[in-house]
Amino acid sequence: MTSKISAEQTNKLFRYMRNGSSVDDFLKRFELSRKELDGVLMACKIYGKEVDVVTKDDKEVFERTPVKRYTLKKMNPNDGKMIHNQICVVSDTHFGSIHNQLHLLNKVYEECHKRGVKIVLHVGDMVDGNYPTRPENPRQQFLHGFDEQARYVCDMYPKVDGITTYYILGSHDETHYKNGQATLSEWIPRVRKDMVYLGQDTGVFDLDGVKIVLDHPGGGSAKSLSYKPQQRIEEMESKHKPKVLLIGHYHKSYSFVYRNVQCVLVPALCDKTQFQQKQGLSNNLGAYFLDIYSDKKGNIQYFMPEEIIFTKDDIWDEVGKDKKKVQQLVIEKKQRRYTRRVDKKAS
Ligand SMILES: [Fe+2]
Ligand SMILES: [Fe+2]
């Protein structure tokens, strides 16, 4: 089976091998034999995903270990000489779409707060945009036009004391500019001091000397998850390559290393769209926590991507709970407080 299983198939199966989840349930769900499971486990190893089967309370369950990647082996992460940062990465929230999942973004920020994460990077398509040439567009949105979507970002984006969100704008955000020369980057910073704009389509973030590039390409995705990102990395000049490349837009979750660039395809935080449904495209919902150990020159010594994936059970349907019931997550001075802010036009 390993010779036939692709990276995308492995990635999909790996998502269901959660820590402590039952091996029997997994085999039944995917109608696999034990022998085939061995093949899947081997494929996971080949594609850099560490998961094993262990016995707990007389039951076989999966146990994951974080993937440790390193470029240099001379330094010990515990010797105090390295700079350690944990950051969070999110993307494609598509606010205003009926597939909005603000409650999941809130969950990610609550987790950031618990972990003491101070930096969140958003890789574009913050809002769903405006497509006048697509007749189906209004029916696919509960917020229409720039004002309603920009107001939603300002009023509803999680606000957590100590966390700064750095963001780029993507293809959907840009439609507002194309239609009326309006940009979120002009208005969000006036209201939200905790949100910092890095650029349209691409932006650079300096994490204690580690160069991180946020990238929101256009166009469709290739069959192989790594194909287009690899092409992008190939085009980069050696001296100007980032240490970390974060890619949004594809609504896919995957991480790999190529030409010494740690590349992460960042999953979306909205549900599958009508377009994806029609095209038979998958849509991954989730986020990443990245543990980055670097030296004083900005070279990465250890890089540990932790994938957070939401499943069907976590998703709210498009009937509109997010539209009507979700509150803005506001956490101030280590005390959790929720405030309800109703967007009158939206509800
Ligand atoms: Fe998107
Ligand atoms: Fe996009």
Image (cartoon, rainbow, N blue to C red):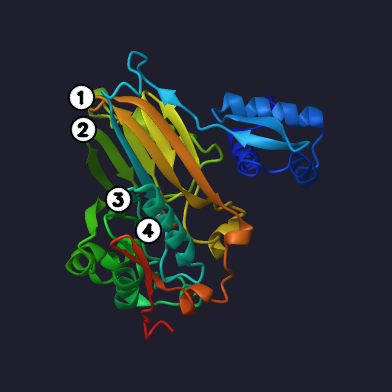
Viewer-side residue, 156 vs 109: 109
Cα separation, mark 4 vs mark 3, equals: 9 Å
The secondary element bearing badge 4 is classed as loop
Cα separation, mark 2 vs mark 1, equals: 7 Å
The secondary element bearing badge 2 is classed as loop
Q: Earlier in the sequence, mark 3 or mark 2?
A: 3
Residue type at tag 1: Lys
- Asked if ligand 1 lies within 8 A of label 4, the reply is yes
Q: At 44% from the left edge and 84% from the top edge, which residue is drawn?
A: 347
Viewer-side residue, 326 vs 220: 326
In which quadrant will I find the N terminus? top right
Q: At 63% from the left edge and 60% from the top edge, which residue is drawn?
A: 313
Q: Which mark is residue 209?
A: 2
Which residue matches tag 4? 125
Which residue matches tag 1? 297
The secondary element bearing badge 1 is classed as loop
Q: Quick one: label 1, few (<14), some, or many (20+) residues within 10 Å?
A: few
Which quadrant of the structure image shows residue 258? top left
Q: Earlier in the sequence, mark 2 or mark 1?
A: 2
Q: Earlier in the sequence, mark 4 or mark 3?
A: 4
Q: Position of residue 76 (x, y in %)?
A: 35, 19
Relative to 11, residue 171 above or below: below
Q: Position of residue 102 (x, y in %)?
A: 45, 66
